[in-house]
Image: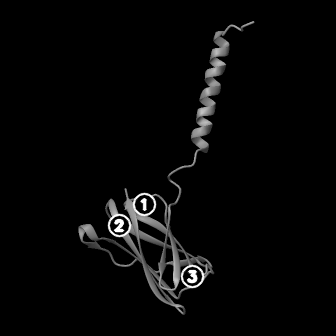
Amino acid sequence: MRRQVTPRRAVIGAVLIVIAALAAWWLWPSDSAKPVSRSTAGPYLVALRVDSPHTGDNTVDLDVTDQQGNVVAPDRISVEPAMPQMGHALPPSPAAAAVTPGHYRATVNLPMPGQWEIAVKLSGAPGTGSATFSVQAN
């Protein structure tokens, strides 16, 4: 015996489909998660994250370890943005501040959209190093 589709059942079915679609959209992994770039910088390993790079001030998060993955505390970390294809080099941002052991934060101003290179320079007891990360600002 086949059940007849009533207007009420059709509406309930449509509502369930809409709810399922919204739940999938809401729970689906987002591309706006902080992308992580990693690089060797002399005796250090540096991971850089910038959440949704854009023109203006951007928060740059850095995780710094030694080559074995142990947390280290360099004496100085500078963050210097540049846009070589346009001939722009900006002064270094104020020194990155320690948030927790091995985790640092700096603010970088990117005055225009496009491909930027962020140079991270570190110095401390293990030695000195630098790494350059590419960031696309919108």
Q: Nearer the viewer, mark 1 or mark 2?
A: 2
Residue 67 - label: 3
Residue 116 - label: 2
Earlier along the polypeptide chain: callout 3 or callout 2?
3
Q: Secondary structure at mark 1?
A: loop
Earlier along the polypeptide chain: callout 1 or callout 3?
1
Residue at image position (44%, 65%) is 58
Earlier along the polypeptide chain: callout 1 or callout 2?
1
Relative horizontal placement of residue 131, taking residue 91 as reference (left or right): right
Asked if marks 1 and 2 touch (Cβ < 8 Å), the reply is yes
Check disc 2 and give the amino acid type.
Trp
The Cα atoms of the two marked residues, 3 and 2, are separated by: 26 Å
Relative horizontal placement of residue 5, taking residue 81 as reference (left or right): right
Packing grade of label 2 (10 A; few <14, some 14-19, many >=20) is: many
Q: Quadrant of residue 53?
A: bottom left
- Say which residue label 1 marks: 53
